Amino acid sequence: MLSKLSWTSLYTLYVISCFRITNSNAFQQPIISRQYIGSSTRSSLSFITKGNEIDDDVISGGGSNDETKEAKRRTAPNSIDNDNKIKENKKKTLKLITFDLDDTLYPIAPVLNEANKAFATAMIKYGFGGDGMISPNDIVETSKKIRKESSTILSHTQLRELAIRREMEKVILNRKLMQTADTWATQVSSLSPLIVDHAKKWATRAVPESVVEAVLSAWEMERHHAAERNLYYECMDVFEQIRKDNPDAIIGAVTDGKANPLFMTFTLAKYFDFCISWEDDQEGRTKFFKELSTINEVGKTTELKWIYNAAFDKYKELSDDGTKNTNEEKNPLWIHVGDDLAYDVGGSSQCGAKTILVELEKTRYKQTARFRFNDDNDETQPDWSTNTEEELKQRKKMNDNATELVDKKIEFLTLLPEAISDIVSDENIKAEKDAESDDTEATKQWNNYSF
């Protein structure tokens, strides 16, 4: 009868031979753990198969030192297959690209000017002009007055709707006062304040809501048509290249106004999967502008995550690539492109997006939005801007805080596909280094392990 030591040695030799079956599909990398029973140390070997887990009994003693080292070498975590698997898991794929629209894909100034002309045309169509009472710029000047007078936070649409209504009231009031003065054979300036006040109340009630909505609709429709006409000339080619380079990426728009690329059916609509507007969430927008007024000199910033979180939620809703449980899907590579330091760079980076600042060559692209913050003087502001002086000061502070959050900056739109590719490449280089670092650390721990 063989001694206990002999049987153990035979069993150890059997296990070591299993390690040398390198081409077998039945066995994969063994996992070796230490178990402590009483005062003796035992090593247990467990093998992971493709579909099953096989646990061997505890081995104690037996086997040569060389055989044990060979087993250890074959099960080291820095094997080629394991190394490639780690790197593959760490690899980044661009999943989401979001864009600002105004002054990023087209110049905002000519677009708004053409939309304001449509406003004047619609006002005349519905009987509120034709006698020199309405001009395209009236809607802008009235919007500025309302914003200064208002103590509430108004969206662009609310502000524009109030401006249209006030312009209609002004036309109705002037006509009523002229009719009254003609009836009494006197001058309008001679009418008593009591009559004027009564005429103002009458004019407010005389404005039909349906006509206000019709004029606003005409303005918004022309805004989208004008955006298509004024797209930067290389814009379509740039989007073609982005789609070619990133066929699986979801592309969305994030805007603080009413622009929507999905309505630009002749140009941008085919490239975009969704659009998120600030005006879709008035609660979040109101909270943001309240916080904006409290920014102080020491660099306090306001929260812009709400709109970008909404964009990311939309991405998750649209994404269905079968990788919802992978690390990559939980934290996908996301790039946001825009011209505004505070809103585009500062806001999106808070949610983990990589950023591209579109600060285009001034003469060629005619951007105007970013120059609002160069001077607080109202006379130097773009004609279309309705921002108050205080709002511009607070935004300037936000811009300064966001400067260091820019990942890439482009001066020509044709460089956008390259900038996107550079960010993806940089992220993959970082991921590969992380994988190598993880693998090195795992190998170090493995080599320090003794049987």
Image: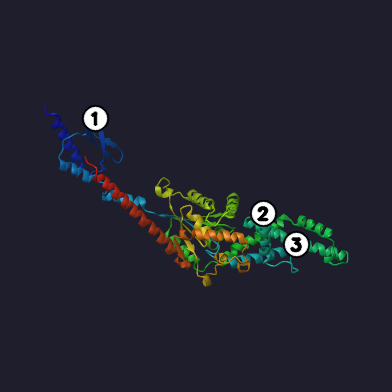
Near mark 2 (Cα within 10 A), the count class, few <14, some 14-19 or many ≥20, is: few
Q: Is residue 383 left or right of residue 37?
A: right
Of residues 292 and 136, the one nearer the viewer is: 292
Of residues 47 and 255, the one nearer the viewer is: 255
Q: Which residue is found at the position 43% from the left and 46% from the top?
A: 324
What amino acid is labelled 2 in the image? Ser
Earlier sequence position, callout 3 versus callout 2: 2
Asked if one can make out residue 20 in the rendered structure from this viewpoint, the answer is no
Q: Which residue is mark 1?
A: 38
Q: Quadrant of residue 148?
A: bottom right
Q: Are marks 3 and 2 in contact (CB under 8 Å)?
A: no
Q: Which residue is found at the position 55% from the left and 69% from the top?
A: 366
Q: Quadrant of residue 166?
A: bottom right
Q: Nearer the viewer, mark 1 or mark 3?
A: 1
Residue 21: % across, % down: 20, 43
Report how far apart the C-alphas of labels 3 and 2 lie in the structure. 22 Å
Earlier sequence position, callout 2 versus callout 1: 1
